[in-house]
Image: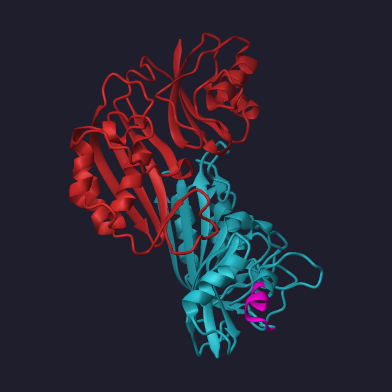
Chain colours: A red, B cyan
Amino acid sequence: MRYLLIISYDGTNFSGFQKQNKGERTVQQELEKALKILLKQDVNVVASGRTDAGVHAYNQAVHIESNVIADKMKFLHSINGILPEDVKVKSIKKTNVHARFSAKKKTYLYKMYISDIDLPLYNYFLRIPKNCDLKLMKQAGEILLGEHDFKNFCASGSDVKSTVKTIYSIKWKKMREELHFYITGNGFLYKMVRNIIGIIIQVGLKKITLDEFKNYLILPYTEKHYTAPSKALYLYKVVY
Amino acid sequence: MRYLLIISYDGTNFSGFQKQNKGERTVQQELEKALKILLKQDVNVVASGRTDAGVHAYNQAVHIESNVIADKMKFLHSINGILPEDVKVKSIKKTNVHARFSAKKKTYLYKMYISDIDLPLYNYFLRIPKNCDLKLMKQAGEILLGEHDFKNFCASGSDVKSTVKTIYSIKWKKMREELHFYITGNGFLYKMVRNIIGIIIQVGLKKITLDEFKNYLILPYTEKHYTAPSKALYLYKVVY
């Protein structure tokens, strides 16, 4: 029997989602450890995709296979009692989907706050200065909509078949000092969202023009990378 | 010369705003200590009002008197370099107002999240269960609008001339799991917002009817107190 689990984690103290041999603490390892304690069997956790070290998740999707889960409410209560405080299971349901291969859309959220001073209460945000031009940033975002080759927004060292991805929507929400950036696409490359944010901020600061930004999508690889920190990035939603 | 400073702090590691003799860490002490280092004179910090232990502020207002502040931008930069990470000065301007006596309106924000499971990423929120009836909570909020005697919402031990306060507005913002409660009034008694939230949640849980809630405003003192925790309370705005 296959189950889809929606999980949430604070990535601060994790070396990313994926299991590692190096003995570093990862979300997958914590989940598999807790599942083994509860279900008394080895369970393989398959996620919609990995998230990098320090990246958080409001709603990461994973599937597991098990024939010993009887009561779903009891499972939730028990697994969350075993799991550490920084990773919890929000829901469980029977499924036919494959957490990774069936994922149709993903939304990431990047949280910024606008201030010339580092402010308390914004530990999980990236500060951007007041002279950052939000209108230019929004225009840069619009350039990304649709299907593009995002190879220049992908950290080197990644090993993927195709760097072509489709961005379905970008939404900005501003609430006083807070600026939330939501990006929805059919998939994201390694560090892609953080590179997008890093470069969009350069556009907002007028260090890169909109034309230069466009060129990031069509010109050959450039060495410059502006990678925004992971502490402000959240996997927000996975759609099947 | 009198200056109005807008300050922000994370209340987690403070024993409230107001200076104490007991040697506990307070916001006022940190501010006065930093001001003394920078201005080389004793400066008395007068706030719009104290906040309790654990309560945060996005925008607390304080005034100071000094004749040695020449460049306001330089002042901001220097004072924030001296202050610890959990309290910062956001702005400074010359003023004629008295931070406490001239305050016309204050807005507090209380942050909740709706979930039957304790979730990561919500350390500065109060969890309320899914069966909490938001419609009832909003109706309870409406009962509070206008001028009322809030003595039953005031923690015992407070020493004030009048417990009559006017609530100008209550706003609820729901964003997925997050529920933000904004309350604006001409002033607030000791623990008043936390008691309001505590009782409104009882209404949402149907442990207290709307009629009983109304009685909290008119009947004599009751021993029961439902004080919501300070970790989710933020002083949001002071209007002069």
From where the camera sits, is residue A74 visible?
A: no
Image position, residue A61 (x, y; %): 43, 26
Quadrant containing the N terminus of chain B is bottom right
Q: Main secondary structure of the magenta part?
A: helix
* Highlighted range, magenta: B34-41
Extreme residue in the right direction = B22
Image position, residue B126 (x, y; %): 57, 49
* Residue at 52% in and 8% down: A67
Is residue B40 shown in magenta?
A: yes
Q: Nearer the viewer, residue A2 or A228?
A: A228
Is residue B38 shown in magenta?
A: yes
On screen, residue B239 above or below A165? below
Image position, residue B152 (x, y; %): 65, 68
From where the camera sits, is residue A101 visible?
A: yes
* Residue at 39% in and 20% down: A99
On screen, residue A167 above or below A209? above
Q: Is residue A43 left or right of residue B38?
A: left
On screen, residue A95 above or below B216? above
On the image, which quarter does residue B23 sit in? bottom right
Q: Is residue A166 left or right of residue A181?
A: left
* Residue at 39% in and 45% down: A110
On the image, which quarter does residue A232 sit in? top left
Image position, residue B207 (x, y; %): 59, 49
On the image, which quarter does residue A134 sit in? bottom left
Extreme residue in the front direction = A223
On screen, residue A183 above or below A105? below
